[in-house]
């Protein structure tokens, strides 16, 4: 199966505390950009200033559960020239290609299939991520961590099979940071925190596949990985000096090219842990199944998968998906 996926950035917006979407007109001033700490990526012999993870952070002032801000974005902007086949999130696409998600709600409204990932995020990972993102994007040393707005991107993807366009997808997701290129264009970056960083085998087993697809669907050519310690202090020699890093802290950052991840996950010609072609196949088969089940306007399904299985189970369930359907109809009344 010759499946290809084309991804194109549409725009950016802020998800505000009332879950509405505020459009971004000036990316260089309204989006979080990488700060001077990115210099540690090219000067690895320098010691990264200590960044503790066991600190208190503000509680989230809101929580999205039904793609509210993206639905509001569509309500303000429409779909563009043509309705997509699917509307969903970057997180959902990443999770389907890497076979991570287990619970999904879908609903067809106005000829468009809306797809919602229902799996919960890991609270500790989310906290570490927020602290690292702040480290890499803060504009001053004393700038406090804020948890009252999320910057998001909007993309469209085309799924082609044998050169023929099969499906179109409009989706949104978090954008960790950007950096302006010499040509004046915005380049997206994914930021990730991992215990032991890239030198830990668990990173390649547990995170590399998900990170590849996260950066792929986020149109991010690079991923910045923060290595963190665990419940014990960590020692590392820098310039022949032994440095001790406290427990629960970030001690190193490294940039990985997204396109190099597949080969790095299969060193020394060993059997690969995952392949890009498998991910494309996973997504194509999933979308094909959804299309074959969700046929009529008003159709609502709960889709589930047993961990370790590639089989998706479809159960028609208007009650469970009612909140999602209502959110769609309220935000996009003319659909």
Image (cartoon, rainbow, N blue to C red):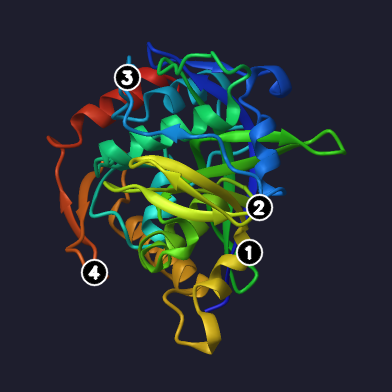
Q: Camera-side residue: 186 or 43?
A: 43
Residue at 49%, 45% (x, y): give it.
251
Q: Nearer the viewer, residue 120 or 53?
A: 53
Q: Quadrant for residue 247, please give it.
A: top left
How far apart marks 1 and 4 lie (CA) works out to: 28 Å
Q: Which residue is mark 2?
A: 221
Q: Which sits in the foreground, 295 or 107?
A: 107
Determine whether 194 is above or below 249 in the image. Answer: below
Say which residue label 1 marks.
259
Q: CA distance from mark 1 to mark 3?
A: 34 Å
Mark 2 vs 1: CB contact within 8 A: yes
Q: CA distance from mark 2 to mark 1?
A: 7 Å
Q: Residues within 10 Å of mark 4 (few under 14, many from 20)?
A: few
* Residue at the (61%, 16%) spot, across then down: 140
Which of disc 3 and disc 4 is earlier in sequence? 3
SS assignment at label 1: helix
Tell me if 93 is positioned left or right of 79 in this view: left
Q: Residue 60 has which mark?
A: 3
């Amino acid at each position: 199966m010759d499946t290809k996926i084309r991804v194109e950035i549409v725009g950016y917006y802020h998800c505000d505390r009332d879950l509405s979407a505020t459009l971004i007109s000036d990316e260089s001033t309204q989006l979080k950009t990488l700060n001077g700490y990115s210099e540690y990526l090219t000067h690895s012999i320098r010691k990264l200033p200590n960044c503790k993870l066991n600190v208190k952070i503000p509680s989230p002032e809101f929580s999205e559960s039904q793609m509210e801000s993206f639905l509001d974005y569509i309500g303000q902007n429409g779909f563009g020239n043509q309705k997509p086949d699917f509307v969903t999130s970057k997180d959902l696409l990443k999770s389907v290609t890497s076979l991570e998600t287990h619970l999904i709600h879908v609903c067809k409204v106005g000829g468009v299939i809306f797809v919602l990932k229902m799996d919960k995020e890991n609270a500790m990972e989310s906290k570490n991520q927020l602290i690292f993102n702040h480290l890499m994007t803060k504009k001053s040393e004393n700038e406090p961590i804020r948890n009252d707005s999320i910057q998001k991107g909007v993309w469209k993807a085309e799924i082609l099979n044998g050169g023929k366009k099969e499906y179109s997808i409009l989706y949104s997701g978090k954008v960790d940071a950007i950096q302006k290129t010499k040509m004046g264009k915005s380049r997206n970056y994914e930021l990730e925190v991992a215990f032991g960083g890239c030198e830990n085998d668990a990173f390649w087993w547990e995170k590399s596949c998900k990170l590849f697809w996260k950066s792929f669907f986020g149109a991010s050519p690079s991923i910045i990985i923060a290595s963190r310690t665990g419940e014990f202090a960590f020692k590392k020699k820098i310039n022949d000096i032994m440095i001790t890093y406290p427990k629960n802290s970030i001690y190193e950052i490294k940039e990985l090219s997204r396109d190099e991840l597949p080969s790095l996950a299969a060193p020394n010609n060993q059997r690969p842990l995952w392949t890009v072609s498998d991910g494309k196949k996973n997504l194509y088969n999933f979308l094909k199944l959804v299309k074959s089940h969700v046929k009529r306007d008003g159709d609502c399904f709960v889709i589930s998968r047993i961990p370790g299985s590639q089989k998706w189970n479809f159960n028609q369930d208007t009650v469970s998906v009612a909140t999602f359907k209502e959110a769609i109809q309220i935000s996009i009344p003319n659909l």
